[in-house]
Amino acid sequence: MTSRDVTPTSLNHQRFQNAWPILRNDILGDFATKGMPGDAIDWYTKNLEYNTLGGKLLRGRAVVDSLAILKGRVLTDEEYFQAAVLGWSVELLQAFGLVADDIMDQSLTRRGHPCWYKVGDVGLRAINDACILEGTIFILLKKHFRGRDDYIEIVELFREMIYRTGMGQLLDVLTGPEHHVDLEKFSIERYRLIAIHKSAYFSIYLPIALAMLMHGIPRESPAHEAAMQISFSLGEYGQVQDDFIDFAGSPEHTGKVGTDIVNNKCSWCIITALALSKPEQRRVLEENYGRKGVENEGRVRTVFEQVGLREQYAAYEEETYRRVTRMIEAIPDDEAAPALKGGVFKAFLDKLYKRTK
């Protein structure tokens, strides 16, 4: 049975969305029991709706998709709702990270709309709003999972993912500080470390690991170790895609204005361009990368085109698809192996392949 057999896309998307109003009411109800006044509840509601909704929901839906694949059948209503609680908790983790990340990067748009800190009089109140979004995760987990045997493992997994993602963000800002451009610090080894911690752990491994825990596969099993290693490769692939889309995608299509060049990001694009550039092209990159001017950004983009960045990315994508496919086929045999090989990771890989936003 394939992932398509157990998780028809349009139906699953709507079913996943249907769980949100229930969980939102749970969240706001808990908030109200803490004695919060009406204006605070209104602000919290806007924070939740603006920052949690509007994305593709790929990470959250991956929890329910993966659990259905592991079970080899359509989930019961109870199973689906429990998995959706975890899926929306992943989406809340994503929302928390994006609110904070947009402030640090001074981004302007997210998902086709102004970043939260740019909305009305939000400003730096968004820092506290990000903290509240993080705390919301554990309110949901406590309400819906406290009586389950896997509750502690699930809470610890979320805590670890938050910690790992923070490590990745730290490496990111230390490697490419806004006001000090030093391209010598950019390396593919450093880049991979950032990608694993900032992207792979929570974007790929977390949804799959949550489904595996719900299915009764302990974290000490060989299947979890294989899942982590494949997640690292998929996470790096997804981060490279994000970097390339930041350079090559249009805001009309992606919903976001690219900022990596002006923000001195240690991205796959600049690392690849540095490796391929001639001396005069490298001088252009050193003199213009990380500068805020439109002309500076334009000069960097010109070098990216000159060194054939689009062709390099196409070749990288094809090679990565083949390599990760081989890793999936090599998953050690145990009771979870058939579903992991034939569905869970292949579904993730297929969602990433040729992604344009």
Image (tube, grey):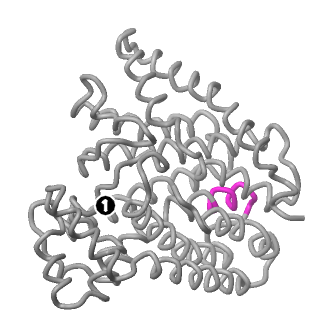
Q: Position of residue 156 (x, y in %)?
A: 50, 55
Q: Is residue 317 above or below residue 152?
A: below
The segment highlighted magenta reads 208-216
Q: Left or right? Give the position of 136 relative to 343.
A: left
Q: Position of residue 177 (x, y in %)?
A: 16, 64
Residue 212 is inside the magenta segment: yes
Q: Residue at x 88, y 57 (%)?
A: 5
Question: In terms of image quadrants, where is residue 172?
Answer: bottom left
Residue 308 is inside the magenta segment: no
Q: Residue at x 68, y 67 (%)?
A: 350
Specify the principal SS of the magenta part: helix
Q: Residue at x 17, y 64 (%)?
A: 290
Q: Position of residue 115 (x, y in %)?
A: 34, 38
Q: Quadrant of the N terminus?
A: bottom right
Q: Is residue 334 above or below residue 20?
A: below
| Neighbourhood count class around disc 1 (C-alpha, 10 Å): few under 14, some 14–19, many 20 upward | many
Residue bearing the label numbered 1:
169
Q: How many marks?
A: 1
Q: Left or right? Give the position of 58 relative to 339.
A: left
Question: In terms of image quadrants, where is residue 245?
Answer: bottom left
Q: Left or right? Give the position of 161 relative to 346.
A: left
Q: Is residue 323 above or below residue 124?
A: below
